[in-house]
Amino acid sequence: SFWEGVDVPGEALELVMLTKLPFEVPTDPVVNARMREVEKNGGNSFFDYSVPEAIIKFRQGFGRLIRSADDRGIVIVTDTRVAKMRYGKSFLSALPKSPDIYLKEDQFLDDLKTWFSENK
């Protein structure tokens, strides 16, 4: 999958679009067993297991874009949960740089065009 083992250095990769947060499938037998273990020990399987695991993969997704000091790029996250859900702040705070958040498409598209024209 995209989240693991991809290395595309340089200008070959300048934009990554994440359409959904990388939560594991809770019905996967291994994932389900880990979640049950968290619950058995008094934890919340979503906040104590699923969210931290997804944050690790989320950071890896950003890492696919920037592999060297010369790499530049943009990551677009279209999953509204990152802005609307309580746990979304945990995803954003896990990033090395504070992201720009757009609520209006026009401003986003203008800034995107500007970025690509300035970084060619």
Image: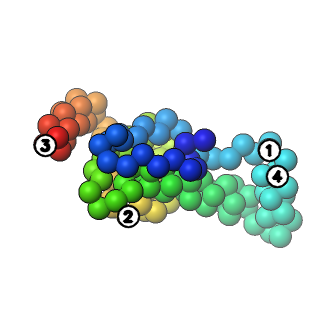
Residue type, mark 2 in image: Pro
Establish if 24 lies above or below 38.
above
The residue that label 3 is drawn on is: 118
Q: Secondary structure at mark 4?
A: helix
Residue 34 lies, in percent from the top left, at 80, 59
Say what amino acid the circle numbered 3 marks. Glu
Give the number of the disc on residue 30.
4
Mark 1 or mark 2: whose residue is earlier in sequence: 1
Mark 3 vs 1, N-terminal side: 1
Circles 3 and 2 in contact, beta carbons < 8 Å: no
The three-letter code of the residue at mark 4 reads Val
For residue 101, say whether it is visible: no
Measure the alpha-carbon separation of dots 3 and 1: 44 Å
Find residue 96 and name its label: 2
Q: Residue at x 49, y 35 (%)?
A: 19
Q: Residue at x 51, y 55 (%)?
A: 60
Kindly indicate whether the residue at mark 2 contacts the one at mark 1 (C-beta within 8 angstroms): no
Label 2 crowd bin: few (<14), some (14–19), many (20+), radius 10 Å: few
Q: Quadrant of residue 67?
A: bottom left
Q: Are marks 3 and 1 in contact (CB under 8 Å)?
A: no
Look at the numbered discs 1 and 4 and tell me whether their residues touch, using CB distance below 8 Å: yes
Q: Quick one: which residue is furthest to the bottom in this view?
A: 41
Q: Which residue is mark 1?
A: 28
Element on which disc 3 rests:
helix
Q: Position of residue 68 (x, y in %)?
A: 34, 59
Quadrant placement of the N terminus: top right
The quadrant the C terminus occupies is: top left
Q: Amino acid at mark 1?
A: Asp
